[in-house]
Image (tube, rainbow, N blue to C red):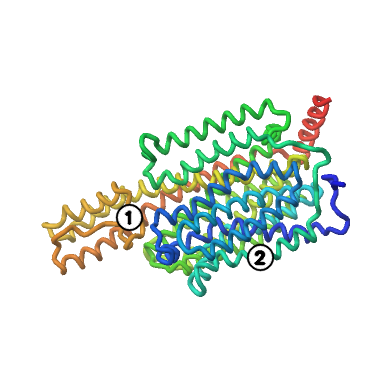
Amino acid sequence: MATPPQAIKPSANPWLVLVFLSLGFFMILLDTTIVNIAIPSIIPALHSSFDQILWVLNAYLLVYAVLLITFGRLGDIVGPRLLFIIGLIIFTAASALCGLAQDGNQLIAARVLQGLGGAILTPQTLGIITLIFPPDRRGGAFGIWGAVAGLAAVAGPTLGGLLVTYVDWRWIFYVNVPVGIIALLGALFVIPDLRPGRRHRLDIPGVILASAGLFGVIFGLVEGQRYDWGTFWNFITIPEIIAAGAIVFILFLVYERFQTEPLVPLSLFSNLNFSISIWISAVVAFGLLGFFLPMTIFLQSVLGFSALKAGLTFVPMALVSTVVAPVAGRLSDRLEAKWILFTGLACFAAGLGLAVSLISLHATQATFWGPAALAGIGLGATFAPLTTVAMRDIRPQVAGAASGVLNTVRQLGAAIGSAVIGAVLQNQLAVQLHDQAVAYSSQVTPAFRSQFIDGFSHAASGGFKVGVGQTGGVQLPAGIPPAVAHSLQVLFKTVFDQAYTNAVRPTLMVSIVVLAVGAVSCLFIETRQKATARAEFLQQRAQAASH
């Protein structure tokens, strides 16, 4: 007989259950960032092109983000424990296959499987936490979950750098196997089997519409920069793909209004705090991408840090976030979470602002430890209260669907952040490369001065890749004497360093503005008493309508 959704097995310690849930969740989030730092090692090892290896990143993110909503709802229907176990098995096996891959295509296929496993597993973690912890203790549980999320988000580059430098790139995947096995044993013997009290059906047309819509939007966002936001294939452009995906997703939402058992119960959005929370989750993901993307390039391409040294620069963020998150979670059980959340977003934005003020060509690793620690306080004070506000008054019967929506919007925010920050960075760098080339052209022999300036302009218009030779991809013109060529190469580096330093500041300001808007949004979150009263009223009205 199925266990009622409100109860757990008496022998199941909810905190021990949380440990195994967090292990599985940690693996999934870690794999969204850890692979980036290994790309320079993977390309020669598998004899793959850069474009092919980009799909090692994008294939995982696409499958993961597109299917979160579907498997979140499926967890409500068949039980979250079963899907958590299935997701763990798929993800762990796929991790081993990634490590064994002999060429780029094999690695991409294994990453698709990883994305599938991650999409199955992730929504079940919040769903199970919502079921096994009473509302007045969820803040502490979400604090642990938030600490894991924060640690995984920022630990990827550091752990990846260590493994690539001292072991082998394949171990960024192999490391998941023992962790996955331990989490699987916990899922089998500790996590209770919680199932709905009555039979439900999966909204198949809703699955098709939601998946197609999300695929179009996210595919367009992650591939847009690569195609310069222009033509993707024949007459089809990237903006058209994004627009088509958005239209299909709107059709999905309209369709859901008329379903008795929708894939995404639209009643979730009548919960004001849930609606604000999913917006803020996108803001936080945007902010993370907006910090890591330009800063990682700056540390390696301009300051010349190794991948490992660049990753270690962010260690204070991970450590501080891990310490703060459980405390913030416990406080959100006792205080109004909106103020903790507001403080967290403000500290995150302040950390980025401090980084902007300290960026220079003379910066060292220690220069950014203070900003990283301040941003870590912000992240730690954000993850747990955000989840508490989002999930506190969600009915257990739709906890999986709510978790799926929350995690999907987070991934969408990351995809938008990557696209926007990448576009702003490229635009700013194009302007700065030209301006700095003009400024330094007086040091070039007059005969080669115009070619020097044109070289940077051509690199910008051709969609340069930052960090290529640390010069933005600028090529020496033909016929340059060796003596002149050496001095030009040195000058190329100087121009690129100064241009990128100037470009990264306004790029980071975009994230600061977005985080500031997110902080203001926290002021509209309802107090706990008011939110609970509204949730009870809506639930009573829904029950009356069903009768």
Q: Residue at x 78, y 42 (%)?
A: 396
- Report if residue 297 is visible in the image: yes
Residue pointed to by mark 1: 499
Q: Quadrant of residue 526?
A: top right
The span from disc 2 to disc 1 (Cα, nearest Å) is 43 Å
Residue 34 screen position, x and y as percent: 53, 61
Tell me the crowding category of disc 1: few under 14, some 14 to 19, or many 20 or more residues within 10 angstroms, Cα based: many
Mark linked to residue 195: none
Judge left or right: residue 410 versus residue 243.
right
Foreground residue, 382 or 99? 99
- Report if residue 519 is visible in the image: no
Secondary structure of the residue carrying numbered label 1: helix
Most distant residue in the bottom direction: 166
389 lies above or below 441: above
Secondary structure of the residue carrying numbered label 2: helix
Q: Residue at x 73, y 47 (%)?
A: 127
Foreground residue, 88 or 403? 88
Q: How many marks?
A: 2
Residue 113 screen position, x and y as percent: 58, 53
Give the mark, 2 or 1, whose residue is nearer the N terminus.
2
Mark 2: amino acid: Val
Residue 78 screen position, x and y as percent: 75, 44
Residue 221 screen position, x and y as percent: 47, 43
Tell me the crowding category of disc 2: few under 14, some 14 to 19, or many 20 or more residues within 10 angstroms, Cα based: some
Q: Quadrant of the C terminus?
A: top right
Q: Residue at x 85, y 46 (%)?
A: 2
Residue pointed to by mark 2: 179
Whether label 2 touches label 1, CB < 8 Å: no
Judge left or right: residue 245 versus residue 273.
left
Q: Quadrant of residue 206?
A: top right
Q: Quadrant of residue 399?
A: top right
Mark 1: amino acid: Ala
